[in-house]
Image (cartoon, rainbow, N blue to C red):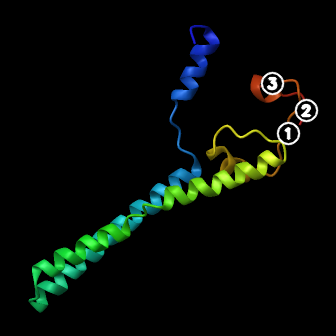
Amino acid sequence: MNTFFGKIATLVEETKIQSHIQKIVIKIGNNLIAFAFMLITLVFIVIFFRHESVLDFFQFALVLLVAAIPATLPAVLSVSLAIGAIALAKEGAIVSKLAAIEEMAGMDILCSDQTGTITKKRTKYC
């Protein structure tokens, strides 16, 4: 890790770039939470006009907030990507990051050779 290559590897490992699917999952979670708050506001207005118990409202609001947060969504996503990694490993591919599976799934053509064209950013033919 004290070499130049080791420092580059450390910098690459520390980079926290979100993949496309991670951004979508976060957006879905945020939309569900925003929808839950809108629904809670609507229920509060209805309870206010019907003169019902505020305690019942708080219980309903708590249940709605807990139900709206997609706690298992990241776990399901990770399991799905891990199954994809297993399938790729059976075909001889090496998967270092699960998020790369989703990124590669959007590709139609991958041009590569054994001379380091992709890693050295030099292209002769594609």
Side of 119 where 22 appears, left or right: left
Residue located at (46% from left, 62% from top): 28
* Whether residue 66 is visible: yes
Image position of 113 with respect to 85: above or below: above
Image position of 32 with respect to 123: above or below: below
> Mark 3 or mark 1, which is nearer the start of the sequence?
1
x and y, in percent, of residue 94 in the image: 76, 38
Residue lying farthest to the top in this orientation: 3
x and y, in percent, of residue 106 in the image: 72, 53
Residue located at (64% from left, 40% from top): 97
Callout 1 amino acid:
Cys
Q: Nearer the viewer, residue 71 or 50?
A: 71
How far is the residue under mark 1 from the one under mark 3? 12 Å
Image quarter of the N terminus:
top right
The answer to whether marks 1 and 2 mark residues whose Cβ atoms lie closer than 8 Å is: yes
Side of 96 where 73 appears, left or right: left
Side of 59 where 89 appears, left or right: right
How far is the residue under mark 1 from the one under mark 2? 9 Å
Badge 3 density bin: few <14, some 14–19, many ≥20, Cα 10 Å: few
SS at badge 3 = loop
Residue located at (63% from left, 58% from top): 80
The residue tagged 1 is 111
Callout 3 amino acid:
Arg
Callout 2 amino acid:
Tyr
Q: Nearer the viewer, residue 67 or 40?
A: 67
Side of 46 where 11 appears, left or right: right
SS at badge 2 = loop
The residue tagged 2 is 125
